[in-house]
Image: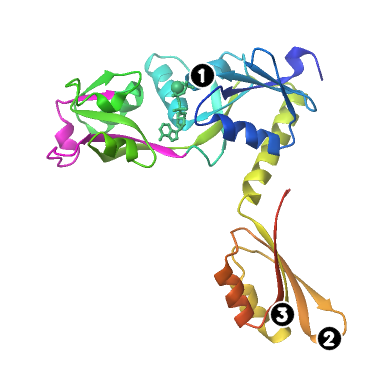
Amino acid sequence: MDTPEQRIKIAVQKTGRLTDHSIDLLERCGLKLTQSKDQLFLYGENMPIDLLLVRDDDIPGLVSDDVCDLGIVGLNVVEEVRQKLLADGRKPRFKQVFELDFGHCRLAIAGPEDTDYRGVDSLKDTKIATSYVSILRNYLKEIGIEAEPVYFSGAVEIAPKLGKADFICDLVSTGTTLAANGLVELETLIDSEAVVIQTQEALTDEKQALVDRMLQRLDGVLQVRESKYIMLHAPRESLAEIRALLPGSEAPTVMPLDGTDDKVAVHAVCRENVFWETLENLKQAGASSLLVLPVEKMLA
Ligand code: ATP
Ligand code: ZN
């Protein structure tokens, strides 16, 4: 599997909020990358997988046109492109195959702090500045409000100050940019995070098998992020109480301890972080020799 067309191409944001996380996740899945001289391309040394570094807005198109097999991009961008294609009577040729749990933000309507906002009716006959015209248009249609989306390619938050719009519809995560511009968040249109999209064109069996393997590894990487392996000794009679205290663990392994009948060793994978308070509560319940280890890899 090594001619260019047999290699999997993944479109990733070149520089921006998603770049480091996207590359880091793929590296944690075992992919070793060499940077090409033009820095538009990262070559996979140990697997037939290459990354194409592009603007995030171009990612759904590249996957749709089969230039790339997969892409990592915000759901906000995927939805805008999808809804625009549908509005133009065209079919999106990509599908979402995985949620990556980073790049969380929401597409929201915001307005000046001093607006007398009384719910969506206050949007009637106003101008709303946004880079997400298709999503906004469909949202307005859904709630039955007539308002005019005004396209801004960036710096949307200054539109009200410039007198170009009454409200804005833009991405928000912490809300500090809004606050800095004297704006307050009013309505949420979509909750977004980074996702993996795949072309709807069928891949060769070999390529699809590798995509499935990478998605399974991604799942493992995401699962272990917060997971811990916990080991402790417990009096047999407190076993039920101790098990109940283990955060997010399913079936712990219980083993006899050499030379004693009334104590056992308990090993468990906890799907949540284990805090000092939990360890103190476990100790209070009779546990001893407590050990918490990070989990590096997991394969269900
Ligand atoms: P490009 O040059 O690739 O077009 P960009 O300026 O459009 O970059 P970034 O600002 O890097 O994009 O954001 C990329 C993605 O990060 C967004 O599409 C969104 O999914 C996610 N994101 C998370 N939090 C925020 C936020 N507070 N503001 C904007 N985007 C955010
Ligand atoms: Zn962009």
Amino acid type of the residue that numbered disc 1 sits on in the rendered structure: Arg
Residue 119 part of the magenta-drawn span:
yes
Disc 1: residue Cβ within 8 A of ligand 1's nearest atom = yes
Query: According to the image, label 3 marks what residue?
Result: 234
Which kind of residue does numbered mark 3 sit on?
A: Ala
Q: Is residue 274 above or below residue 76?
A: below
Residue occupying the far left of the picture: 116
State the residue at coordinates (70%, 16%): 36
Q: Is residue 11 left or right of residue 17?
A: right
Q: Secondary structure at mark 3?
A: strand
Q: Earlier in the sequence, mark 3 or mark 2?
A: 3
Residue beneath label 2, please? Answer: 260
Q: Which residue is mark 1?
A: 55
**Visible in this render: residue 300?**
no
- Which image quarter has ligand 2? top left
The residue at the point 63 percent across, 49 percent down is: 223
Work out how far the residue at label 1 is from the one at label 3, CA to CA, in angstroms.
54 Å
Which part of the image, by quadrant, shows the N terminus?
top right
Query: Mark 2 vs mark 1: which is more N-terminal?
Result: 1
